Amino acid sequence: MPPHRGAFYAVRCFHVETASIGDAARGNAGAGRMRVQWWRDVVHGIYSEEDGDRSGDSNHGLVGVPDGVARPWPQSGARRGVPSGYPVVSCLADAVGAHGLSRRWLDKALDARARDLDVSQPATVGDLERYCDHAHGSLLLLALECLAPGGGGGCGGAGLHVGADLAATHAGIAVGMCTLLRGAAVHAGRGLLPGVPADVLKRHGCRPSHLLAGPPPPDLFDEAADDALPEVEAEARRRRRQVPLRTEAEAAAARAAVREVAARAAAHLAAAEDLCAGRVPAGSTSGGGGSSGGSSGGCSGDEAAAAAAAAASDFGYGPEDATAVGASGALTGPQRLAFLPCVRAAAYLKALDAAGHDLWHPCLWPRPRWAILCTSHLT
């Protein structure tokens, strides 16, 4: 097995474990905070152990290892301050020891999961992007450190592509936005709307209820059909009949709000593609029309194009950035594997455009794996 694969999977498992904290809490924010704090203590224990083991100042009285001699990284389950019996924790500790993963990315990911327990909807697009950067961009940056040549790890370290960390930030934001939009139906069941900021809804005259309330089933108003269903489902149908149906104007406003978020995600995805190709996003240094025209993930229409152009022109890269990224050339080698989540994000944006940016369209339901694998974005 390639040496980086175990570390790569450890980071992914950490992401899955922490991302499920909000769902497992089931509205109990206190229980969720306890779980987040447990992971913070785990991360602290891992890095405290690493600092002690690698400093060379002391070996804490270990038999057979004199002070001043750094001992090898211990085997899984033999670390002080790190709970034993948890495979994900042990594998993550091994990855940190082998690749020198940066602690700040793990801390930022945990900050994002703590936010899940307190915020039901971001206030602005900036808040949404910041959350996606912490939750998903941090994951991609950790993956890049795992895949760095020589296993050096650390942003800016030897072997790391100059534009790779910048691309990971943009890709993480895009992947995070698509993940939140794709999970709209699940979040709606909990009364949450994390994928569309409040300022975007206000700009399009859309209310949260317009997005949370999907289209009714075809036979919703057939009360005779309730008799053949279990009592719980029949009661749910009776409650759904009491919810006012969306008007066409309300549905159009909801689609416009989703279209703006999708255009922003597409601009970040195109920026990541440009940076991986060894160039800064078009428009960042000249204030031009943006680079998302050819890689917008399927967004169309005058409004979406204007939003994408505005997004691509405010990333703030200067001439020095363009020189540094250009000198590094295109990203090659195993580090490109860190950007595989972009494939699914691009496929979702294309499907979302085909659905008219209706989050409840059947074509956005889970797709076969072969359909995802046959679509490549960062080729």
Image (spheres, rainbow, N blue to C red):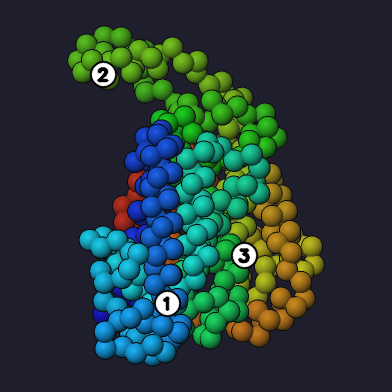
The relative height of residue 176 versus residue 237 in the rendered view (above or below) is below
Q: Residue at horizontal 29%, vertical 61%?
A: 83
What amino acid is at disc 3?
Ala
Of pointers 1 and 2, the one earlier in the residue sequence: 1
The relative height of residue 160 versus residue 8 in the rendered view (above or below) is below
User: Decide: marks 3, 1 in contact (CB < 8 A)?
Assistant: no
Q: CA distance from mark 3 to mark 1?
A: 40 Å
Nearer to us: label 3 or label 1? 1
User: Decide: marks 3, 2 in contact (CB < 8 A)?
Assistant: no
Q: Is residue 284 left or right of residue 57?
A: right
Give the secondary structure at mark 1: helix
Residue that numbered label 2 is attached to:
232
Q: Residue 129 appears at what percent x and percent y?
A: 60, 52
Q: Residue at horizontal 43%, vertical 50%?
A: 37
What amino acid is at disc 2?
Val
Q: Residue at horizontal 26%, vertical 13%?
A: 226
Residue that numbered label 1 is attached to:
52
Would you call the spot at circle 2 few (<14 residues within 10 Å), some (14-19), or many (20 or more)? few
Residue that numbered label 3 is attached to:
271
Of pointers 3 and 2, the one earlier in the residue sequence: 2
Q: Is residue 196 left or right of residue 288?
A: left
Q: CA distance from mark 1 to mark 2?
A: 57 Å
Q: Residue at horizontal 26%, vertical 88%?
A: 64
